[in-house]
Image: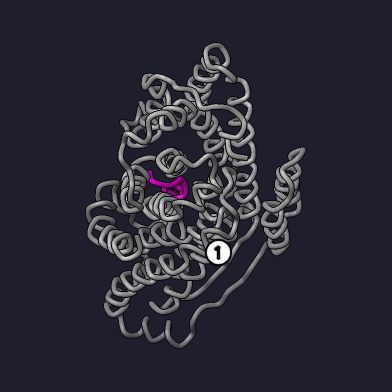
Amino acid sequence: MPASQIFAFADVPLAGVAPFALLLLLIATMPLSPHSMKQWWDKGYHLVALALAALVGTWYLAKIPDGGAALAHTLGDYFSFICLIGSLFVVAGGIHLKVKGEATPFANVVFLAIGAVAANLIGTTGASMVLIRPWVRMNKIRASAYHVVFFIFIVSNVGGALTPIGDPPLFLGYLRGVPFFWLIDHVLIQWLVTLGAILAAFYAFDRRSYRHMPGKIRSDVETHGETWRFEGGVNVLLLLAIIGAVFVSEKFFLREAVMLGAAVASFFFTPKVVHEENHFSFGPIKEVAWLFLGIFVTMMPALDYLAAHGQALGFTHATQYYFASGALSSVLDNAPTYVNFFQLAQTTAAAPDALALLASHPHFVVGVSLGSVFFGAMTYIGNGPNFMVKAIAHDAGVHCPSFFGYIFKYSLPVLLPILALAGWLFL
């Protein structure tokens, strides 16, 4: 249920946004800071997130009318969000693909296209964790930086733009009232064209690399192909249970109970060897859980401020939402970016809830959705799976570009023109 149907938005001062801005700044910069500061962050990020959340939560309880209702609603949204993300992470961690041999450029394109579809079913995080290791193995002879970069472009970001399961920002939209299949009806063509253009760019890179392989190795690849092996089949059924849970009633947290039950079953029924081969641990989801607790609570003043003052910003065209949400999603996590621009769109359209916004200004929601999801691929810090993919590929011995190498060699000259063209054509 949209928050506006539960309590009136408070007219908070702009200074109330400071804890939210500080937390996002720390999330964006600390992983890139000197070693000593990074160590401090790795040990204490949860305390920082909790402290900032407690500061804002206490302020709402003490100073904001109906602040308790607002805080309770926000924590309910957070619980639903983390149950989905966490259950997908655990279940995806119980699936292991083994592949032998070296892939041709065409096989690689097919693999990435399948990964893009899978991202809508198990989330960009789940698809990235399941597929990055077989992706590296099937290209082990010539795996290079562009293999990692285009995997992030497609599987970790652009692929998951069709369903609320696909990418965290879209699930937050679902929690705010956007119907599950609304995006598929409105962005499928844009998604296909954008994905096709990125795959074509990858094929050009990969074909050039393939041609430089020694002739004997290339002949062996074309003759023998790949051998596949799938482990952890029980988790496919559990993934279906999680997908089905999205449609379960939210009363009494039934939806979340099904998701958590699937995650627990996956953890105990998955063979230990599969978790070992996937190097599975709860570290990444623990970090997401703590940081997003801080994000959800500290974001409350930002949403209230946009509700009160958003119309003055003059965002009246879908391309403004597309490029503005995209610009912030490039350097901040795309989930809070989506929520803030969704609120801005709702305020600008004077829509009392999400359904009214979809009826009167659907192009605003399309712009926010595609901008938040697509542009999350512009940097390593735009979306959660990006850094995890980089770390796994690096551990496997693949050369990965630096933070700025990623931007100046790949995302600016290759990805940005494609995304800009997509915005110009469709918005």
50 vs 386: above or below = above
Q: Secondary structure at mark 1?
A: helix
The x, y position of residue 17, in whole percent, is 40, 24
From the viewer's side, name the closer residue of 227 and 260. 260
The x, y position of residue 14, in whole percent, is 37, 22
Part of the protein shown in magenta: 379-391
Q: Which residue is mark 1?
A: 118
Q: Is residue 82 above or below residue 170?
A: above
Q: Residue at x 43, y 21 (%)?
A: 12
Q: Main secondary structure of the magenta part?
A: helix
Three-letter amino acid code of the residue under disc 1: Ala
Task: Find residue 401 and report its horizontal and vertical position in percent.
Answer: 30, 53
At x 58%, y 39%, the residue is: 2
For the residue pair 387 and 16, the one nearer the viewer reads as: 16
Residue 393 seen in the current view: no
Q: Nearer the viewer, residue 165 or 67?
A: 67
Q: Quadrant of residue 175?
A: top right
Left or right: residue 180 versus residue 248 is: left
Q: Is residue 207 above or below residue 255?
A: below
Nearer the observer, 415 or 390: 415
Asked whether residue 129 is drawn in magenta, I would say: no
Residue that appears at 39% across and 55% down = 374
